[in-house]
Amino acid sequence: QVQLVESGGGLVQVGGSLRLSCVTSGLTFKKSAMSWYRQAPQAPGPEREWVATIASDGGTSTYADSVLGRFTISRDNRKNTVYLQMNGLEVKDTAAYYCKASTPRDYWGQGTQVTVSS
């Protein structure tokens, strides 16, 4: 059974930092591209916004323009875990954050809430 469990969310002030973690089990992590998505409460539809992706070997990372230079995605294949370091948080970053494993079938975690207050 594949499981993805996110943690590390919380309440932070503008300009603060958080580090999200996503621990996986039941899949071949080292062969999975991993991504972070988010869904803001005011989003007009059900689709989640892509945030960042890291290749299975950790060699390539890509970011949405909205987080480029502030967020860093990383992974530890020994721990089957992907991380999202978020610095310089802004109110607009408030959202539920989800990790996704692409094996290439997609699996999602349950999400962790990030709230940025002014």
Image: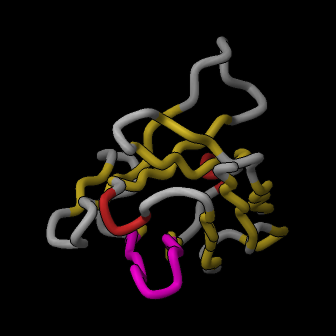
Q: Which residues are magenta?
A: 72-83
Q: What is the residue that sits farthest to the right in this orientation?
A: 11
Figure check: 90 above or below 46: below
Identified at 64% across, 50% down, the residue is 2
Q: What is the residue that sits farthest to the top in this orientation?
A: 45
Identified at 24% across, 72% down, the residue is 58
Q: Nearer the viewer, residue 58 or 61?
A: 58
Q: Is residue 97 visible?
A: no
Residue 60 position, x and y percent, is: 16, 64
Q: What is the residue that sits farthest to the bottom in this orientation?
A: 78
Q: Is residue 104 visible?
A: yes
Residue 104 position, x and y percent, is: 34, 37
Figure check: 79 above or below 94: below
- Quarter of the image where one finds residue 20: bottom right
Q: Nearer the viewer, residue 81 or 97?
A: 81
Residue 116 falls within the magenta-colored stretch = no
Identified at 51% across, 57% down, the residue is 27
Identified at 63% across, 70% down, the residue is 23
Prevailing secondary structure of the magenta residues = strand
Residue 67 position, x and y percent, is: 40, 55
Count every numbered label the image shows and give the total: 0
What is the image's colouring?
A: secondary structure
- Quarter of the image where one finds residue 118: bottom right
- Quarter of the image where one finds residue 108: top right
Residue 75 falls within the magenta-colored stretch = yes
Figure check: 112 above or below 7: above
